[in-house]
Amino acid sequence: MRRHLVVVSVTLWTFVLCAAILSAQDNMGQGAMAGEGNAKEVAAKLQKISAALQLTPQQKQQIKPILMEEAPQLQAVKANTSLGPLQKAMQLRQIGESVDAKVQPILTPEQWQKWQAMRSQERQQMIQKMQGQ
């Protein structure tokens, strides 16, 4: 029973994280062509992250290609109608973990803590949003 609860919790966490990412992308990229939309989404996301974490110009330069690589991957998973919600959530979680692994060495320990707090806050907001529906 305890194992089942852990699996359900991890699955819910993954779904919430992925839904938050997709929701943010939907809000930023509506009406734009895929390539142009990705560039705009990445610029907006980088600006938000930069302000929150007080990134240096060098850090921005290092993080931008990571975000540019992430955007089409997220969009492809979102657009894949052959995947069920759980499969999408798992793939999106993998993408998020990959981004985290690439970003962590670029950030200072303080920035990394803020990064993780931002992720946690996004998850909490999505849980609240889902409970309100």
Image: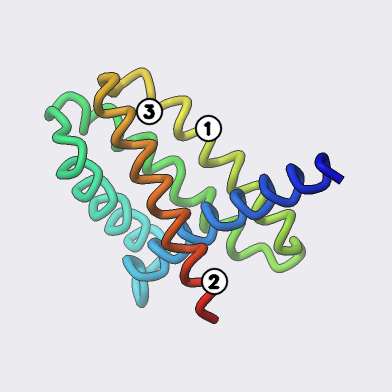
| Residues under numbered marks 2 and 1 in contact, where contact means CB atoms less than 8 Å apart | no
The residue at which mark 2 appears reads as 130
Q: Residues within 10 Å of mark 1 (few under 14, many from 20)?
A: few
The residue at which mark 1 appears reads as 98
Q: Earlier in the sequence, mark 2 or mark 1?
A: 1
Q: Nearer the viewer, residue 70 or 7?
A: 7
Residue 36 in the image: above or below residue 117: below
Q: Amino acid at mark 2?
A: Met
The CA distance from mark 2 to mark 1 is 26 Å
Q: Outermost residue, right direction?
A: 1
The residue at which mark 3 appears reads as 103
| Residues under numbered marks 1 and 3 in contact, where contact means CB atoms less than 8 Å apart | no
Residue 118 in the image: above or below residue 38: above
Q: Amino acid at mark 1?
A: Ser
Q: Secondary structure at mark 2?
A: helix
Query: Picture coordinates of residue 54 (x, y %)?
Result: 14, 35
Query: Picture coordinates of residue 10 (x, y %)?
Result: 67, 45
